[in-house]
Image (cartoon, rainbow, N blue to C red):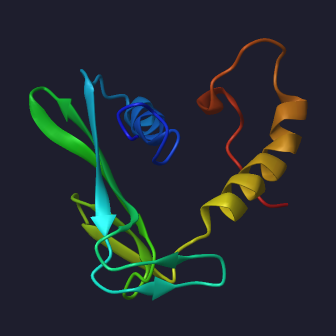
Amino acid sequence: MFKAGKAGHAGLKESLALIAHCLGWKVGRIIETGDAVVAERDIRTQYLEVKQGQTCGLHQRAEAKVNGKVRLTLDLKMYLDAAEPHDAIQIEGEPPLNVVVNGGVAGDHATVAALVNSAPRLLQAKPGLLLATDLAVPRFA
């Protein structure tokens, strides 16, 4: 299902390419993998039940090399009954950053918020086909 494009986070490779573009990095091919996460025990949610041994989610990863070295990695684990769900960002630099958002950010809500908050910037943009990086930087007035 993953290789057929019917499972996984839509746009993970594109998100990685956008980050590289914003950094001014030229990347070669982006490698994306996806593996099933298998339930270690029975899981019941308000919507469905997953038996031990069945697929309960996905581990998806995208990597990009710059000058032959892996410089960007997006590692996404989406599965039921995850212990301590969170979003994390690690940046190796000066200073190094390791940011953890406990509980994570709901992807659907974040996408809608990004779209709604881009409306003022879109209204001020020049006509034509633009990249997200062509829009003004978001700000709060």
- Total labels drawn: 0
Query: In the shown orientation, is residue 130 left or right of residue 63?
Result: right
Give residue 138's position: percent from left, percent from top: 71, 49
Residue drawn at (79%, 61%) of the image? 140
The correct choice, above or below, for 40 with respect to 122 in the image is below
Q: Say above or below: 28 vs 69.
A: above
The quadrant holding residue 137 is top right
Q: Is residue 127 above or below residue 98?
A: above
Q: Residue furthest left?
A: 68
Identify which residue, 61 or 140, lies in the foreground.
Answer: 61
The residue at the point 80 percent across, 52 percent down is 117
Question: Is the N terminus in the top left, top right, bottom left or bottom right quadrant?
Answer: top left
> Which image quarter: residue 91?
bottom left
Tell me the quadrant of the picture where the C terminus can be found.
bottom right
Place of residue 130 in the rendered image (x, y in percent of width and height, measured from the top left): 69, 19
Residue 58 lies, in percent from the top left, at: 37, 58
- Residue in view at x 65 percent, y 26 percent: 134
Q: Position of residue 136 (x, y in %)?
A: 71, 37
Looking at the image, residue 48 sits to the left or right of residue 16; the answer is right
